[in-house]
Amino acid sequence: DAKTTQPPSMDCAEGRAANLPCNHSTISGNEYVYWYRQIHSQGPQYIIHGLKNNETNEMASLIITEDRKSSTLILPHATLRDTAVYYCIVRDIQGAQKLVFGQGTRLTINP
Amino acid sequence: GAVVSQHPSWVICKSGTSVKIECRSLDFQATTMFWYRQFPKQSLMLMATSNEGSKATYEQGVEKDKFLINHASLTLSTLTVTSAHPEDSSFYICSARDLTSGRQFFGPGTRLTVL
């Protein structure tokens, strides 16, 4: 079973920051938070991952709360091409666990 | 980033025939590959974990005799849907775990339609 909870859908205006929340209250100390997204009819695309510190890359920023029970993925300037289903997944550091997908958040970027 | 390819990207077949889908890691070695299935408007469901040189591990409810998996090399895994039926029509996605980094990358998916 997926260990995360996400809102089923969100809308965001083009050019604005999209903030996608994820709850992972049962996360253990050796588990990372991963974010993937899936654009319609394509395979999932890796976005970012983190353990406890905030992370940033060319695609997004990941903010993890101090207690690690929740996180937020931030797309700073959303474009129409960011419309996708976003999945938040927790998995162990060694990568031994399987990537189990929940229902994700369907993000729609509106012009 | 690392690239995972799938072939074919789509296939239409008659009921009762078998279909083979290939998954390749193009620029990295993968001792472990994963096969997922996705029905319309649903999330990805893990079908099986494929380990190079050994038998695949199937998730509960997935028939191993129907979905044959072969992982003969560090860069290739195949999924064969045997005696396909219309209810097997789905989007099949493979994923490969990089031996070096442990990161997991996904293929573009194969859309199977069984008539």
Image (cartoon, coloured by chain):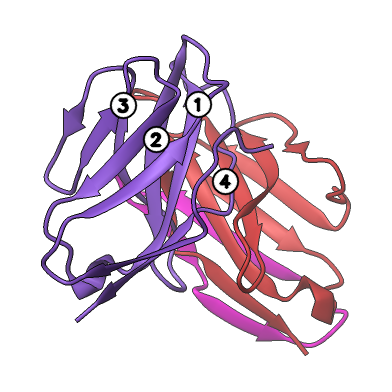
Name the chain letter of the residue that bears numbered label 3.
A
Residue type indicated by callout 4: Phe
Q: Which marked residue is nearer to the observer: mark 1 or mark 3?
A: 3
Name the chain letter of the residue that bears numbered label 1.
A
Residue type indicated by callout 2: Tyr
User: Reading the chain from its start, which is encountered first: label 1 or label 3?
Assistant: 3
Pointer 2: residues within 10 angstroms few (<14), some, or many (20+)?
some
Quarter of the image for residue A69 reads top left
Residue type indicated by callout 3: Ile
* Residue beneath the point at 52% across and 59% down: A8
Residue that label 2 marks: A34
Q: Is residue B60 visible?
A: yes
In which quadrant of the rendered image does the N terminus of chain B lie?
top left
Quarter of the image for residue A37 reads bottom left
In which quadrant of the rendered image does the C terminus of chain B lie?
bottom right
Label 2 and label 1: CA atoms lie apart by 7 Å
Pointer 1: residues within 10 angstroms few (<14), some, or many (20+)?
many
Label 1 and label 3: CA atoms lie apart by 15 Å
- Apparent side of residue A57 relative to residue A81 in the rendered image (left or right): left
Same subunit: marks 3 and 4: yes
The answer to whether the residue labelled 1 contacts the one labelled 3, judged by CB atoms less than 8 Å apart, is no
- Residue stretch in magenta: B1-27
* Residue beneath the point at 78% across and 40% down: B58
- Say which chain is purple: A
Label 3 and label 4: CA atoms lie apart by 19 Å
Q: Which marked residue is nearer to the observer: mark 3 or mark 2?
A: 3
